[in-house]
Each structure stands twice: as structure tokens, then as C-alpha cells.
Amino acid sequence: MKAKRLLLRLFDFVAPARRLQVVSGDSLPPRLPLRALVLARDGDEDWCVGMRCPCGCGRKIELLLIKEAAPRWDLLLDEEGRPSLTPSVWLRDGCQSHFWVRHGRVHWCP
């Protein structure tokens, strides 16, 4: 398992940065792309952002962006359109991945 994570981290380092795809509506599609983040936007309101877990376990991660949610995340795009998320993403069960998304790249927490 550790070797698989190490290879995925190396691949993530050399692969192009993740991009943001926008879908209409207040929910994510049933299937998420391998490396992109997907933003669910209903009208002018951003509801959530989703991605597949970068550890390779295949888990669908959904992070709420609406002000009323707890916990909630903020999504920022840099000048090149690369997404960043705050705070970090920490999965408390399953693979227990803990990482930041900064400028379209995953930065693993120790």
C-alpha cells in the first residue's frame, strides 16, 4: 500500500495540475473524472466541489462550499485557473488521506 501511495505522489508531482470542471445543478455527477475537481454550480451559487481521492482508493470526495454548511471549504482559482481548497481535506475513515489542494496540486500532510 505504501508503494502505491508513493507512486501516486510521484505521478501527481510530474502530471499536469488538476483543473476545475463546472457542472450545472446543486449536486455532483455520479462519476467523477480521474484528476479534475468538479464544481456543482446552481445559477450563481457554488454548492460543492468533488474529486476522487488522490490516494488511489477510488473514493468520491464531496466538499460543501455553501455558507450554511459545517464543515465547509473555500475554493479559489489562481490566475491560470488552477483550483485551491481551504482548509485541508482529511478523511477520518477509510484510507484516512490528509492533504491540501494548492494551485491544482495535491500536497500531502505528514
Image (cartoon, helix red, strand yellow):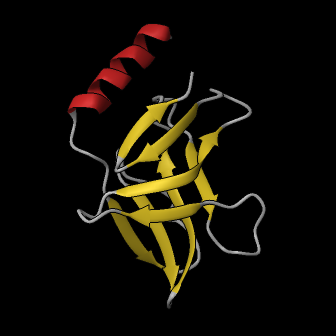
Location of residue 93 with respect to 64 vertically, above or below: above
Q: Is residue 21 left or right of residue 99?
A: left
102, 51: nearer the viewer: 102
Q: Residue at x 59, y 44 (%)?
A: 88
Q: Residue furthest bottom?
A: 43
Q: Please give the name of the residue rendered at 57% of the width and 63% of the height, measured from the top-left corner.
A: 74
Q: Quadrant of residue 19?
A: bottom left
Residue drawn 49% across and 9% down? 2
Relative to 38, residue 2 above or below: above
Q: Quadrant of the C terminus?
A: top right
Percent position (x, y) of residue 52? 48, 44
Q: Position of residue 66 (x, y in %)?
A: 66, 74
Hey, which residue is sitting farthest front in the picture? 79
Foreground residue among 40 and 13: 13
- Point 27% across, 26% down: residue: 11
Left or right of 70 in this view: 94: left
Q: Number of labelled discs?
A: 0
The quarter of the picture where residue 96 lies is top right
Q: Left of 58 or right of it: where is 6?
A: left
- Give the x, y percent position of residue 14: 21, 30
